[in-house]
Amino acid sequence: MSNTGAFQYWQRSMIQAGPGTVLRLPSLFSSLGGKRVALISDPGLVQAGLVDKISRLFTDEALPGAPKLVAVITDTAPDAESGSVNRALQQVRASAADSILAVGGGSVLDSAKLIKLAMYKQVSDVQELMKLPLQMLKWPEVSAMGIPHIAVPTTAGTGAEITNGAVIYNQELGIKHLIFADYMEADIAVLDAHMSTGLPPHLTAATGMDALTHALEVIAHPRANDFALAHAMTSAKIILDNLPKAVANGNDLMARQHMLNASAMACNSLQADMGPFPVHNFSHAFGSVFHIHHGEANAVLLPAVLEVMPEFYAPVADRLGELFGLSNEDPRSLVLSVAVKIRELLELLGHPQNFSRHNLLESKQGDIVQAIAQDTLSAFYPLPAEAITAVVRRVCVW
């Protein structure tokens, strides 16, 4: 939001939500004019049987003009590595696909978005789209891309299915790039609870905490715009109500569906209100240096950052307190009480509260501190050096 109160809230994707909605995929591509579909996914979803499940939807030759699945690309790397994205781009081009179907978690969804942007920009190497750590391409530099694009999330965490941003790991530089481009998001997002029921409890917890962190980072922005704040507050409440249920019973379809809905809302609020997001500043760096899963990183870092930086959150302590049923404390104490509630939630979910299981070397402390200080998000809010060191030592248990 500008100093005048002006803001832009971008949400272009149609939402198709509910158990069983993936059955509509062929007809949805037909409605977009798609004829030759490239499916982007990852090895884990091949093993889980979800890639075959989706592929079988495109085998009905009886339907006149039905879209065809011309490529199935399943070697997407964690963290959406630039080399992996390039290999997928080459396969999409070789198949003469005119449409993209992304089925997976954040790495798959972000990879598909960059593939679409590369097709639109007619570049052969995605490095050409990664000139700066933070890039924002706006109309008229980009316009409607004319490439039918549907996203099917299999985790309730990133919300990347409806956002026009992508986080891509640059293997040459060892950093994560944050790329925003109007019209890069999917035309349609299909939120089907059946696609996430196979996710094990620890990943359900980690991805759900990722979504909660998205919501809380927006809530913690004192100048969040009304649309973003409404989505963030609502999604946070839904997550707090349903994440424990989804972890306790992975086949609870309604809990899974509520989590998918909330995840999309939370991330859309985040992209529509870019500002100081200290938890993500830390988690991006831990992902780049130590390759820690983004959801796990956010979950561990969220209470630690609240504990080390309560003064940052004090201006919005009342919002945070409302979510967790807390009040009648001074702002600083209220923030610390919220951190306690989040740690109680992590305990309930069986989620780690530090990175001790990764055996991170203390000799790498300088590398991680530097990565945090230089992360793209530090442009919005440079983290104090003492806070960086305190959080790092707290979560790494050095």
Image (cartoon, rainbow, N blue to C red):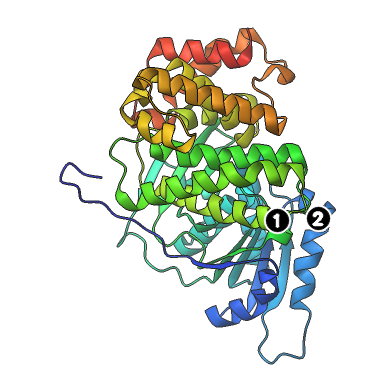
Question: Could you tell me residue 44's position as x and y percent?
Answer: 78, 48
Q: Check disc 2 and report the residue beneath it.
A: 46
Q: Secondary structure at mark 2?
A: helix
Where's the C terminus, which quadrant? top right
Query: How far is disc 2 from disc 1 in space, using C-alphas?
Result: 8 Å
For disc 2, the neighbor class at 10 Å (few under 14, some 14 to 19, many from 20) is some
The amino acid pointed to by label 2 is Val
Judge whether 261 appears above or below 135 on screen.
below
Tag of residue 380? none
**The image quarter in which residue 10 lies:** bottom left
Residue 56 sits in quarter = bottom right
125 or 185: nearer the viewer? 185
The N terminus - image quarter: top left
Q: In the rendered image of this protein, does residue 116 appear above or below residue 57?
A: above
Of residues 257 and 296, the one drawn nearer to the viewer in this rendering: 257
- Can you give x and y, in whole percent of width and height, for residue 304 in the image? 53, 20
Mark closer to the chain start, 2 or 1: 1
Q: Circles 2 and 1: CB distance less than 8 Å?
A: yes
Residue 66 position in % (x across, y down): 68, 85
| Residue 52 visible | yes
Q: Position of residue 20 (x, y in %)?
A: 70, 69
Q: Amino acid at mark 1?
A: Ser
Q: Which residue is mark 1?
A: 41
